Image (spheres, helix red, strand yellow):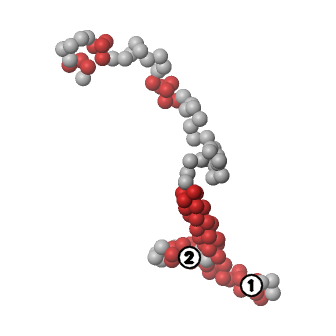
């Protein structure tokens, strides 16, 4: 598009002489403090989240932890909660878990 203008020459519109770094080097350069691990701490005193947002985040995390514990007890539970039929693997896991509990009851451990 810069070649179709009748005002000025091609050099007016191109920034080739103004660039000090090649495009290939820019794409490979390490970003300044980008995506540092553990950079967003939940209990950061300088965090600007409101109390309501902090409470909502904690409630969400608590529900995720509860769902993880429930799924360990019953492998078919996550699918049932979402209104879906459990997968074949989840059904097999539930059967294995039930058989192991029965074996433990026979041995008197549980």
Q: Residue at x 18, y 14 (%)?
A: 6
Do labels 2 and 1 touch, CB within 8 Å? no
Helix, strand or loop for disc 1: helix
Report the residue marked by disc 2.
Answer: 77
* Left or right of 100 in this view: 18: left
Q: Residue furthest left?
A: 6
| Residue 53 image point, x, y percent | 54, 57
Image quarter in which the N terminus is found: top left
Looking at the image, is mark 2 or mark 1 earlier in the sequence? 2
Using a 10 Å C-alpha cutoff, classify the residue at mark 1 as few (fewer than 14 neighbours), some (14 to 19) or many (20 or more): few
Residue 28, percent across and down?
A: 52, 29
Asked if residue 93 can be seen in this view, the reply is no
Q: Residue at x 54, y 28 (%)?
A: 29
Residue 103 spot, x, y in % from top left: 74, 84
Q: Secondary structure at mark 2?
A: helix
- Residue 103: numbered disc: 1
Q: Nearer the viewer, residue 96 or 44?
A: 44
């Amino acid at each position: 598009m810069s070649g179709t203008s009748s005002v000025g020459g091609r050099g007016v519109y191109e920034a080739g002489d103004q660039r000090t770094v090649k495009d290939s080097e820019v794409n490979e350069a390490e970003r300044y403090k980008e995506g540092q691990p553990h950079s967003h701490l939940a209990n950061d005193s300088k965090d600007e989240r409101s109390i309501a947002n902090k409470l909502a985040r904690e409630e969400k995390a608590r529900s995720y932890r509860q769902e993880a514990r429930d799924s360990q007890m019953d492998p078919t539970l996550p699918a049932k909660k979402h209104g879906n039929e459990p997968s074949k693997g989840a059904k097999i896991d539930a059967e294995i878990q039930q058989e192991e509990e029965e074996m433990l009851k026979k041995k008197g451990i549980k």
